Amino acid sequence: LTYLVRPPASWPGCRRELYGCAGGLQDAEGTCNETIAAEIPYLSEMGCSGPGYLDTHILGVRHMYHQGSDGVTWPPNFGFDPEGVITTLSAVPAMFLGLHAGHVWGTLKEPKAALIHWLALGAVLVIAGSALSFWLPLNKRLWSPSYCLCTTGAATILYAGFFGAVDATALHPQSARAFAGCVRIALAPLQWLGANCILFFVLSDCCGVLDFLLRSITWGQPHAEKNIVAWFQNIVLMKWFNLGAHCSGAYADCGPAVMTYIWVEILAWIVICGVLFHKNIFWKI
């Protein structure tokens, strides 16, 4: 479905000139007041893909995250969704492999046997994904099968490494157990984030719920600039900390300021999830 399905030559997304809604904004009726030549990579690179073609027909163009047209007129007549039906089919196996990794420990309950199983499984997945990539290239946007196999295999090996270093204390010689304790303390923030991963995913910039709520609290016009998030980015980081001194554009174009804001967010979420972890508060579905 990812690579063998090819849109016909008449498919709008395969035309040379593509157009998207200016700023990606549409009104409540879904109309676009201004179209521009599509510079969005998703439209120009994925509009002529099998997943985009199939998802547009299955879900309808109005349900596509990225919508485009082969003419300056609107409404859109093709689209692509990075989380559509086709890309989701490739992402689902990663969830099952994660579930399997947990069942391995629940079934074997023996550190050495579990480590051998995880390392062997991870190696097989990485090798299979690498071999498959010669025919089905690694592609995160399409979540191609080769990408899925390689990333899940690497994650399984990494998980086995963390488990061996932190949790499998029975396998450590006596002299190394103090070092393992230090490693456990150093990796504790990852445990806190993982224990409340759903909360972290939904409220952080991954879904942007908390950012949306904070930006909705304004104290003047324009609302996009008179809110606590914009104040922190444009005033605290760009002016007080002088991170914008070597940037010619606004905050969004200033790499040092953007990276600093990202690290501040990560540290804040580590503190929040750490407090919740020690209070045994976990958001589950």
Image (cartoon, grey):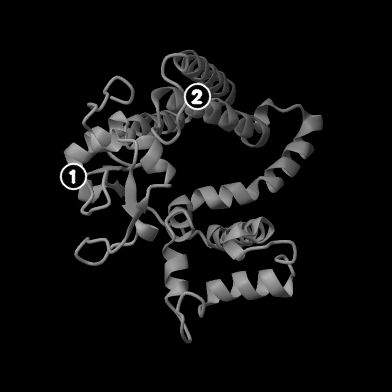
In this rendering, the answer to whether 124 lies above or below 30 is above
Which residue position holds label 1? 60
In this rendering, the answer to whether 179 lies above or below 104 is below
Label 2: how many Cα within 10 Å (few below 14, some 14–19, many 20+): many
Amino acid type assigned to the residue bearing label 2 in the image: Cys
Q: Which residue, as the protein is rendered here, is positioned at the far right?
A: 175
Between residues 38 and 263, which one lies in front from this camera angle?
A: 38
Amino acid type assigned to the residue bearing label 1 in the image: Gly
Secondary structure beneath dot 2 equals helix
> Could you tell me residue 20's position as x and y percent?
33, 51
Counting residues from the N terminus, which is met first, the one under dot 2 or under dot 1?
A: 1
Label 1: how many Cα within 10 Å (few below 14, some 14–19, many 20+): few
Q: Residue at x 67, y 62 (%)?
A: 248
> In the rendered image, is residue 40 in sight?
yes
Q: Quadrant of the N terminus?
A: top left
Q: Which image quadrant for residue 176?
A: top right
Q: Residue at x 64, y 59 (%)?
A: 254
In the rendered picture of this protein, how many numbered marks are placed on residues? 2
Q: Residue at x 33, y 62 (%)?
A: 25
Secondary structure beneath dot 1 equals loop
Looking at the rendered structure, which numbered label has been put on residue 150? 2
